[in-house]
């Protein structure tokens, strides 16, 4: 289960900036498949269980999109 953490304002902005680099059209969302591909092919690879947990929490089940501003607000403490 994902829990909210206190990243501080600076880190919250860094997290938003990171998601925005994945959204060059500035739509406010990233496709779940794009996130899944990145988590399995770049940097420290995530396990399938970690990916499933993350996507189940972060991605809108109807649209298949991760609305990253909503996600960042859910996982950070203001």
Image (cartoon, rainbow, N blue to C red):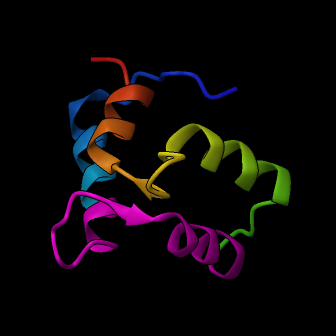
Residue located 70% across and 26% down the image: 1
- Residue 56: give x, y in percent of width and height: 64, 42
- Residue 60: give x, y in percent of width and height: 47, 45
In the displayed orientation, state which residue is furthest to the left.
26
Viewed as shown, does residue 76 lie left or right of 4? left
Residue located 74% across and 69% down the image: 45
Residue located 26% across and 17% down the image: 78
Q: Nearer the viewer, residue 64 or 14?
A: 64
Viewed as shown, does residue 52 lie left or right of 56? right
Q: Looking at the image, how many numbered discs can be counted on the residues? A: 0
- Is 77 covered by the magenta stretch? no
Q: Indicate whether 43 appears above or below 51.
A: below
Q: Which residues are magenta?
A: 18-42
Q: Indicate whether 2 appears above or below 62.
A: above
Residue located 54% across and 46% down the image: 61
In the displayed orientation, state which residue is furthest to the front.
62
- Is 21 covered by the magenta stretch? yes
Quarter location, residue 65: bottom left
Q: Indicate whether 27 appears above or below 75.
A: below
Viewed as shown, does residue 17 lie left or right of 56? left
- Residue 15: give x, y in percent of width and height: 34, 50
- Residue 5: give x, y in percent of width and height: 47, 23
Viewed as shown, does residue 52 lie left or right of 37? right
């Amino acid at each position: 289960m994902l829990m909210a953490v206190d990243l501080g304002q600076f880190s919250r902005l860094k997290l938003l900036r990171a998601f925005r680099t994945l959204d060059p059209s500035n739509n406010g969302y990233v496709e779940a498949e794009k996130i899944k591909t990145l988590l399995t092919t770049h940097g420290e690879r995530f396990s399938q269980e970690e990916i499933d947990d993350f996507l189940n929490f972060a991605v809108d089940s109807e649209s298949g999109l991760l609305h990253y501003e909503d996600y960042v607000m859910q996982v950070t403490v203001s």
